[in-house]
Amino acid sequence: MNRSCETLVATLRERLGEDLRDCVVALDEVTIEVKARRLSEVALTLRDDPALAFEQLIDLCGVDYLLYGKDEWATEESSTTGFSRGVDEASSGRLHFGDSLPVGDMERRFAVVVHLLSLQHNRRLRVRCFAEPGDVPVVPSLTGVWNAAQWYEREAFDLFGILFEGHNDLRRLLTDYGFVGHPFRKDFPLVGHVEMRYDPERRRVVYEPVSIEPRVLVPRVIRDDNRFVLPDVEGPADG
């Protein structure tokens, strides 16, 4: 851990106290986790405290931890053994139209991740907040602290179905009018629920159930190939 990270971690522990659920340093990056009900207060401290001064919100996104660590791809050793083919029906890659994954009782499924920047101290910080357990994930809006969160929160609502309490214009941002569901959730079929085409007889676009057969895709992995490595060529001898 470099000195800048050590200083930031010490300041965060001092200023946030019990609001700091977790603090991790990896690859010289600091990530903290806070409770959802305290997110607004923590955000104000991160912005207004002179020792922190995270005045700029760089990014905000949603995360779905459904089946986290239980996917059908063995990727932990991908750099040496490559990706395995999907063999277990564990992810939404094998869902058919109308199917659904057994969600079960998940205490920590949906999270909001925020990336902050302090121009004054030249530091970055990642803040993670899990929505409280319930039928609908709800997290306090950060638009009152950083106005840049407006569209980011709309995107997270559109793609993950996360509600941001206090957002004054929480509408879908990327999906089509009348779209059903949230496409970035892990239990949303990869092929979607409907497909669209132009009907020349009706002279309009129509929506129909998907006709694509779902399948598990094999990710493309690029590896070094010794066949294309140029041999070392020594230059002409002096003299």
Image (spheres, helix red, strand yellow):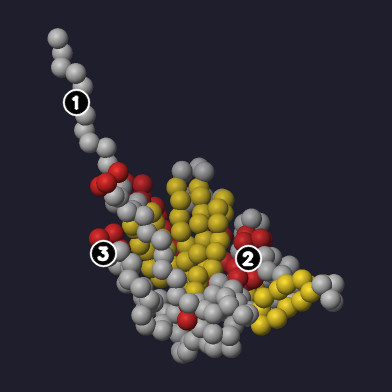
Identify whether 137 is placed above or below 61: below
Q: Position of residue 239 (x, y in %)?
A: 14, 9
Sort mark 2 into few (<14), some (14-19) or many (20+) by Cα contacts within 10 Å. many
Front residue (pair 81, 143): 81
* Residue that label 2 marks: 155
The residue under label 1 is: 234
- Given the image, on which type of amino acid does mark 3 rest? Thr
Of the numbered discs 1 and 2, the one sitting upstream in the chain is 2
Measuring 54% from the left and 75% from the top, which residue is drawn there?
190
Q: Image quarter for residue 202?
A: bottom right
In the rendered image, residue 28, in percent from the top left (x then y), is placed at 35, 51
Residue most toward the front? Answer: 201
- Taking the view exactly as shown, the residue that stands out farthest to the top is 239
Left or right placement of residue 221 versus residue 192 in this view: left
Q: CA distance from mark 1 to mark 3?
A: 34 Å
Could you tell me the amino acid type at mark 1? Glu
The vertical placement of 105 against 203, above or below, is below
**Residue marked by disc 3:** 81
Who is closer to the viewer here, 172 or 210? Answer: 210
